[in-house]
Image (tube, rainbow, N blue to C red):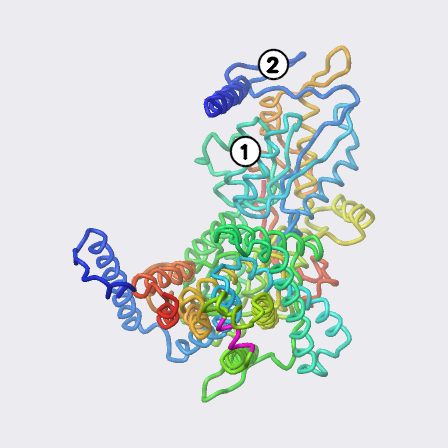
Amino acid sequence: MRNAKVIWLALLALAVAVGSLTAGYAAPVRMGPVTDEWGVVRVARGQPIIIAYWLVVAGPDASLGVDSRRGIEIAIDDKKTVAGHPIRLIGEDTGCNAEGGQTAATKLAANRQIVAAVGSSCSSEAVPGAPILCRAGIVTVSPSNTAPRLTDPKRGPEYACYLRTAHNDLVQGRAAALFAYHNLGVRRAATIHDGSPYAEGLANVFADVFKRLGGTITAQEAVSPTDTDMRPVLTRIAAGRPQLLYYPIFIAAGGHITRQAKEVSGLENVKLMSADGTFSPDFWKAAGEAARGMYHSSPDLSVEALGPRYQQFLQKHQRKYGERPLSAFHAHAYDAAMMIFAAIEKVARKDAQGNTYIGRKALRDALFATRNFQGITGNLTCNPYGDCADPKIAVYQTISADPAKWSPGTDPKKLWSLPRPRQ
Amino acid sequence: MAAGSAVAPRVRRFSFVDAFLWAFRLAVVAVVVWGTVGTLRLGRYTAEQWMDFFVFGLAQGGIYALIALGYTMVYGILRMINFAHGEVFMSGAYTAYFVAAPLAASGFLNRQPFVSLLLLLAVAAAVSTGIAVLVERVAYRPLRRAPRLVPLITAIGASFFLQYAFRGLYGSGFKAYPEFDLFKGEWELLGVGILRTQAVVLVSAAVLMFALYQFVMRTKVGKAMRAVSEDKDAAALMGIDVDRIIVLTFAIGGAAAGAAGILYALVFKQVHFFMGFVPGIKAFTSAVLGGIGNIPGAMLGGMFLGVVESVGPALFLDGLGIPAPYQLKDVIAFTMLVMVLIFRPQGILGERLAGKRA
């Protein structure tokens, strides 16, 4: 008896859930003055427009996500209102792993008032997370995902709501390989990734370009992000006698590799190079003095590359948080938020009472139609697969490795930047 | 091979499962032999590099072994797996950071490295001991007579509670441990360079394990512990305060885990609230590998696991032409566990105790 009741209740709940899911997509939704295939968000007069972040804001890689969140917060301070509504920012931590991205996206997808999202931080989070948001019709712009596959022409319709203001790693990997081959004069290199889409993608691009330039890749190794003892894998790499070690991974594991590389016999004189995932004062904390002299490829954050608006941004950042940016993607996050605000203003419609209606698919289309958007990071134009960046990549060298002295440009010192194609 | 085979002459039947197990054993042995021969024929590594693999593995294994002692002692006495033990390990190392950082800032750490090290060990051991005893009192003692699955579940609960309590207390980021200038660089030993931190870890782990073994085998309290482990009720009848002995077991296991935490921090220089999870699982594996409930077994299991993780991928997989073999080091470690459990279900050194308790 009781069992039968429970089963009936479960079936009923299932039917309601399926019904509400399909109702949103089967036919265009009409609400107020707006009709939209993906659904419509109604923001009552005087109520805030809700923007969500899904970024890594806790754990060992928190500096990456907090840095981006601050960029969004400054954008909100600058913009103040969108279509006559104040802006409210809510968010979820993503943990810089696939499970965290999935959980955060599921939580956000359940909130029907969210108009658009900024995220994720790590590419591994976006791989399962973005399709969940897409099913809910929430468009998302990532400030720091760089894995090539996320905006690949073959990425599939489940990523139709995903864009990014961060560079594609096809650019960063090429920059790193060019610098290593031409400027450092290195001919033998080894790569290490941690199995994440970001690290694996970047390490592969580096290896491909480096080989095409005429260099030799002595080993393409992998570790797991929770590994601590890197000496055995480094000993294996030492057997190939590389001159450069490229490990575009994250802070915790990157710190272990940096500290342990020089302790392994055969790697005493090897040059170390990492990428934007470890471009943070937190990495100096993790790696200690061993980081001195190592190289990083990262977005070019110098004022000469980004112009006076970046200078103003830095002043606001200093006033608001009392310190310099924690990582490399605050400007990208600022641009992502600003791009979303501009698109909302383009598609928002008001009824006679002053309530605002935003069509979800219309917003998505408006974002993909972004052309020559003047952001801090450059002149942003989105391609049909969601790549919006105006990529500027530079190579930095660590001088002091003292987190208190972190100041990209002077320390770590900017050595070189990728020549930009003339447009 | 199995206990009880002497009671009645068993009918030997070669079942499908037996065939499968034999095929599995042969397959693994063949892969290992083929891979090893292949690697050695490639001649990729020098003798010195093999030595490095081995020493790195031993140092890592020493830490596993110290944590494994806590698992194995508690199992020996209570027949339960204390899954919160990895967090006991974390709590000591994480708390001692707040002593190490000011010591380093004032320069005392490098003026008096040995005093500082002892101080850190004392703090970490004290905190870990306290946490271990507290967990026993709150989470396990009220459930002493409950079915065996119950304390296992509370152990997992205690483990989560500790992780997130420490996350709340100390924050979710990692902390960078200060470095001892004295322990930078290498020492030459019999013509082999060995990293100073690893030498310190190996020596400390060996001394601690030797002391513990002597304590259990030679002292009166140690004898009482062994008695409780064999038969709780009989031990109580002989006038042993069983609850006191159990608390003592948790305390000693906790102290060893605290010391392991400091050694871990010396080698890896990062601590965070989640750091106990992976070493905890590995140490548990070591304890099972060596024969759970057996103290020398835990030491041997820890060392064995450390060395297999370090040497295994290069030795077995290089010759097979598998790319990025170190990604598979956990696969090797756990396949090794499966193999040991198939060949010797009681673990490497488990037989004597298993016989005693049958």
Measured from the top left, where is residue A213 in percent x and y?
A: 44, 57
The outermost residue toward the bottom is B190
Which residue is more in the foreground, B222 or B29? B222
Question: Which chain letter goes with mark 1?
Answer: A
Measured from the top left, where is residue B324 in percent x and y?
A: 40, 59
Q: Is residue A44 left or right of residue B94?
A: right
Residue at figure coordinates x 58%, y 15% from the top left: A29
Question: Which chain letter goes with mark 2?
Answer: A
Q: Is residue A164 left or right of residue B348?
A: right
Q: Is residue B226 magenta?
A: yes
Q: Earlier in the sequence, mark 1 or mark 2?
A: 2
Q: Is residue A277 visible?
A: no
Mark 2, residues whose alpha carbon is within 10 Å: few (<14), some, or many (≥20)?
A: some
A13 vs B241: above or below:
above
Measured from the top left, where is residue A161 in percent x and y?
A: 55, 30
Main secondary structure along the magenta-highlighted residues: helix
B92 vs A315: above or below:
below
Which mark is drawn over residue A35?
A: 2
Q: Is residue B165 magenta?
A: no
Q: Amino acid at mark 2?
A: Thr
Residue at figure coordinates x 80%, y 48% from the top left: A315
What residue sits right under mark 1 in the picture? A383
Task: Specify start and end residues of the magenta stretch as a single range.
Answer: B221-227
* Cα–Cα gap, marks 1 and 2: 25 Å
The outermost residue toward the right is A319
Measured from the top left, where is residue A322 in percent x and y?
A: 81, 52
